[in-house]
């Protein structure tokens, strides 16, 4: 488990892969590589973070060729990780464990921004209830061919709430992640602001915490 903070939140997913690979090499860890003409490290991430979104608790899987203890991996990597990438916990995962993409099906987001004419608590709660009561919550997405299409994100919204602190609005939501039905927090925010008519100054600051499948603890998923 790791955090992606500060300047590191602006690096792309590809750069994140490279950062972990370089750190593992500098740490002298026996990282495993694929076979073939263009071998690459056996590194996988549960759910890629959008550029600009900080990750409070994200999951990565690194395959090793030797029997290296979690303590050694944690110490070695922590000493060489670039600024903004911070290890939280290292665990040995058995080969029989499911893939990370299958284990992490949702993520908890926190989004903060300055709001004009902040509403009362009751008005904000009513705005959220009205938004979530819509039969569909449509956003516009582009297909791989560049074609614009409407997509209903409502099935991927597991929970949503908000509160006001002076002129700051803080939205919290649990959204679907993964290769199928993935919902971007920016889509939720845009749809809610349009639906509610609230006026926000500037952009939202986003943070994310990856979560394991509903009803499963981390230990149940990994062992």
Image (spheres, grey):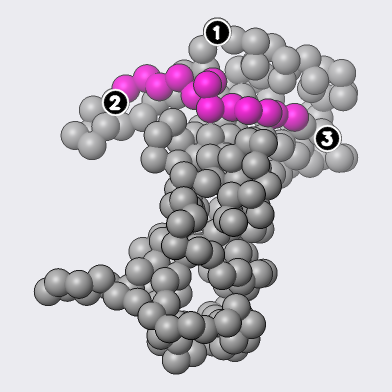
Determine the image quadrant of residue 29.
Answer: bottom left
Q: Position of residue 120 (x, y in %)?
A: 87, 23
Q: Nearer the viewer, residue 86 or 36?
A: 36
Give the Cα distance between marks 3 and 2: 34 Å
x and y percentages locating residue 59 in the rendered image: 55, 59
Q: Secondary structure at mark 3?
A: strand
The mark that comes first in sequence, 3 or 1, is 1
Q: In the picture shown, does residue 12 fall above or below 162?
A: below
- From the image, state whether disc 3 or disc 1 is nearer to you: 1
Q: Earlier in the sequence, mark 3 or mark 2?
A: 2
The answer to whether residue 46 is above or below residue 75 is: above
Q: CA distance from mark 2 to mark 1?
A: 21 Å
Is 42 covered by the magenta stretch? no
Task: Answer above or below: position of 154 versus 10.
Answer: above
Total labels drawn: 3
Residue 75 in which image quadrant? bottom right
Badge number at residue 135? 1
Q: Secondary structure at mark 2?
A: strand
In this figure, which residue is indicated by the disc labeled 3? 164
Rendered image quadrant of residue 202: top right
Q: Residue furthest top?
A: 135
Residue drawn 82% across the image and 39% down it? 167
Residue corresponding to mark 2: 148
Q: Is residue 32 left or right of residue 76?
A: left
Report the Cα–Cα distance between label 3 and label 1. 26 Å
> In percent of the image, x 64 and y 58: which residue is there?
57
Report the span colored magenta: 149-161
Residue 55 point in image, percent of width and height? 60, 57
Q: Mark 2 near mark 1, Cβ–Cβ under 8 Å?
A: no
Q: Locate the C terminus and report the quarter of the image it occupies.
A: bottom right
Judged by its main secondary structure, the magenta piece is: strand
In the image, what residue occupies the spot 59% across and 50% down? 221
């Amino acid at each position: 488990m790791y955090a992606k903070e500060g300047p590191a939140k602006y690096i792309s997913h590809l750069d994140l892969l490279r950062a972990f690979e370089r750190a593992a090499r500098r740490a002298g860890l026996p990282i495993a590589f694929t076979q073939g003409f263009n071998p690459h490290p056996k590194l996988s991430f549960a759910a890629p973070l959008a550029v600009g979104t900080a990750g409070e608790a994200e999951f990565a899987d690194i395959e090793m060729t030797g029997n290296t203890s979690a303590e050694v991996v944690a110490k070695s990597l922590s000493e060489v990780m670039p600024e903004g990438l911070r290890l939280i916990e290292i665990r040995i995962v058995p080969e029989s464990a499911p893939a990370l993409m299958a284990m992490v099906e949702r993520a908890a987001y926190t989004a903060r921004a300055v709001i004009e004419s902040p509403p009362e608590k009751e008005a904000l709660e009513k705005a959220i209830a009205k938004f979530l009561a819509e039969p569909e919550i449509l956003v516009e997405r582009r297909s791989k061919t560049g074609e614009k299409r409407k997509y209903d994100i409502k099935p991927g919204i597991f929970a949503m709430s908000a509160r006001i602190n002076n002129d700051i609005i803080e939205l919290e939501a649990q959204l679907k992640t993964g290769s199928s039905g993935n919902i971007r927090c920016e889509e939720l925010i845009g749809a809610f602001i349009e639906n509610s008519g609230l006026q926000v100054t500037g952009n939202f600051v986003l943070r994310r915490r990856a979560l394991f499948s509903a009803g499963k603890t981390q230990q149940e998923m990994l062992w």
